[in-house]
Amino acid sequence: MELDIGSRLRAVRIARGLSQRELAARAGLTNGTISLIEKNRTSPSVASLKSVLDALPMTLSEFFHAAEQADTPKFFYTAEEFTELSPPEHGFNGKASARVSLRQIGAAARHALQILHERYPPGADTGAEMLSHEGEEGGVVIEGQIEITVGDAARVLNAGDGYLFDSRLPHRFRNLGSVDCVIVSACTPPTF
């Protein structure tokens, strides 16, 4: 499921009573950048969008929230029911295939655990800016390989390898390989 990021950001910003200039100052960006995002003329990296949402404050999960019926518990999800949390980037060198995909199972805001199915095409990464958020996260590489940087430590993980760290530490994911990298990860509490 895809979302019009620009319209959604504008609606959230207005609902919070912020001007583009105020939001830009809080996020450490120019108001021109916020304007371009809201007009869908530029697509932010995962890290840039996270910075903007942190300034609101709002998690990626809340921003891309697909409402579940409050009175009906849901236990099972088809692949089509996952919520895409990654901005629809144009990719590297104009190749949409280099888009990072972060697909969430269910409405994380209603749970103590956030589960993601992640896909990093060759050359893809979470952005030049390091991510940082409350919680802990861990995962297992299912296919391919990924370079993960946590603080000053960096390591390339292969299929079958895993990771677990305090998400408040600055971190970044990059696929330096020649095939897609697939990861199944979890974050608790759901703050990403």
Image (tube, helix red, strand yellow):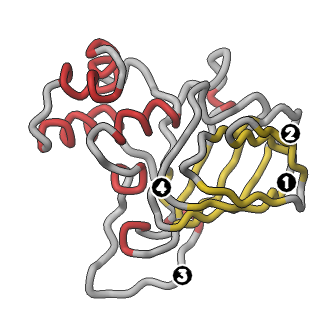
Quadrant housing residue 93: top right
- Indicate left or right for 5 with 31 as reference: right
Label 3 to label 2: alpha-carbon separation: 29 Å
Front position in the image: 159 or 156: 156
Estimate the x, y position of residue 39 in percent, counting from the top left.
Answer: 29, 22
Q: Is disc 4 surrounded by few (<14), some (14 to 19) or many (20+) residues within 10 Å?
A: some
Amino acid type, callout 1? Glu
Circles 4 and 3, Cβ within 8 Å, touching? The answer is no
Q: Amino acid at mark 4?
A: Glu
What percent of the width, then of the height, locates residue 182? 76, 52
Q: Earlier in the sequence, mark 1 or mark 2?
A: 1
At x 28%, y 23%, the residue is 24
Q: Which residue is mark 3?
A: 76
Amino acid at dot 3:
Phe
The residue at which mark 2 appears reads as 179
Identified at 58% across, 50% down, the residue is 102
Q: Is residue 74 above or below residue 65?
A: below
Location of mark 1 (residue): 143
Which residue in the protein does label 4 denote? 134
